[in-house]
Amino acid sequence: MTIKIGIAGVRGLSMMLGFNSIPGVEVTALCDLHEGQLLDRAARLRIPNTYRIYEDMLESDIDAVFVATPMQFHLQQTIQALEAGKHVLCEVTAGVTMDELWWLKEAVEKHGKVYMMAENYCYIPENQLIGNMVRQGMFGDIYYAEGEYLHSNRHLAFGHNRRVANDPTANRTSWRHYWQYGKRGNFYPTHSLGPLMQWFRGDRIKSVACFGTGWHTAPQFRQEDTSVTMCQLESGKLIRLRLDCVSNRPGNCGYYTLQGTKGSYEAPRGLGDQHKIYFHTDGEQMDHAKWEPLAGHYDKMPERYRNATEEQKRAGHWGGDYFIVHDFIEAVRGGIPPAIDVYDACEWTAVGLLSELSIMNGGRVIDVPDFRNASSRRDQVIKL
């Protein structure tokens, strides 16, 4: 049976190659408020049905929705889709308030449809490789990690989602002006946090504390130049997140580091750097410790990445966009649970929301609710 997909937001066409690469899957509907872009993209990609009204698309015979609209619409459109009997793959973040995260958890549990958050940085090949090496015990007992999202894109606070020549809306504030640059703390944590939490699988984030640098580069925004969020896991282990979407600097959207008792990993920093690892040997003098290229261990990549076709690799994010769609479709077909489920989505998103509360209270440590073990948000209290 063919699984019919509807995409909400033309930005979601980034996953089109992923959907097209899977037999028995067809994108049959596209929805966007911008009629010109909607009709142009649908014609070019041969998507038969177009909608400007989201509810109209939900009344069609699609089986699942990919929600790729601005983040403040994710919760409402996800719940509407679940209520309409559709499965949901949703872009990050899962919601924009803590209440929304509880509503999401309750809706997924109530309706029994597949919900998966589309955090594609979890599917970057090197992140999958490190995860495989963690599971094989190569790093020993892992206890510290870092993730950074450094992407100076403050121009997106105005106009459309991307630069357009002679854009008449260029001086108008966009949704990012309010929901990203209008926030303090880490408004966009999941690209950095998601891969790390998959390496720490089985643990959970117990508390967060966030600190900011103040306003130097673009004081017109509430978002500070850099924020640093410390996450303590239930096990006592630590994760450090840095967000910087303001400073004048080259970008690095996917920097990670991992430390364990037997070794460590660092992603590239730029200027010809490469992914690198270190493994400790008994009796080694640490003054002589040296990195080695991660590339020498690509044979430990998950098998499906090693065997990926050229078409799958072209799907975006170094092939990650194919595998995230594949896992979602397999969950819809009942073969596997969603790889990034509603509890992951709520916990990872909550880190960003609570980082704002922390930074506005002088870096106060804020407890993160345990979404997996609470039947209702009434069971959880955020302590200041």
Image (cartoon, rainbow, N blue to C red):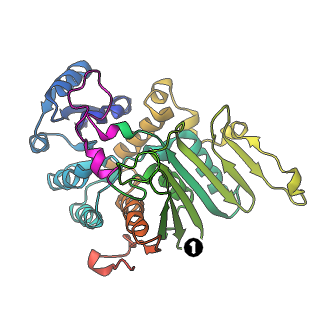
- Give the side of residue 40 with respect to residue 208, left or right: left
Give above or below for 90 relative to 273. Answer: below
The quadrant the C terminus occupies is: bottom left
Does the stretch in magenta take in 167? yes
Q: Would you identify the image quadrant in which residue 222 lies?
A: bottom left
The quadrant the N terminus occupies is: top left
Seen as rendered, the residue at the extreme top is: 44
In this rendered view, identify the residue nearer to me: 348 or 352: 352
Give above or below for 204 relative to 249. Answer: below
Q: Position of residue 374 (x, y in %)?
A: 34, 76
Dominant secondary-structure state across the stretch colored magenta: loop
In this rendered view, identify the residue nearer to me: 4 or 220: 220
Instruction: Point out the stretch of residues depicted in magenta.
Output: 156-182
Amino acid type at circle 1 is: Ser
Q: Position of residue 354 (x, y in %)?
A: 39, 66
Q: Position of residue 147 (x, y in %)?
A: 55, 52
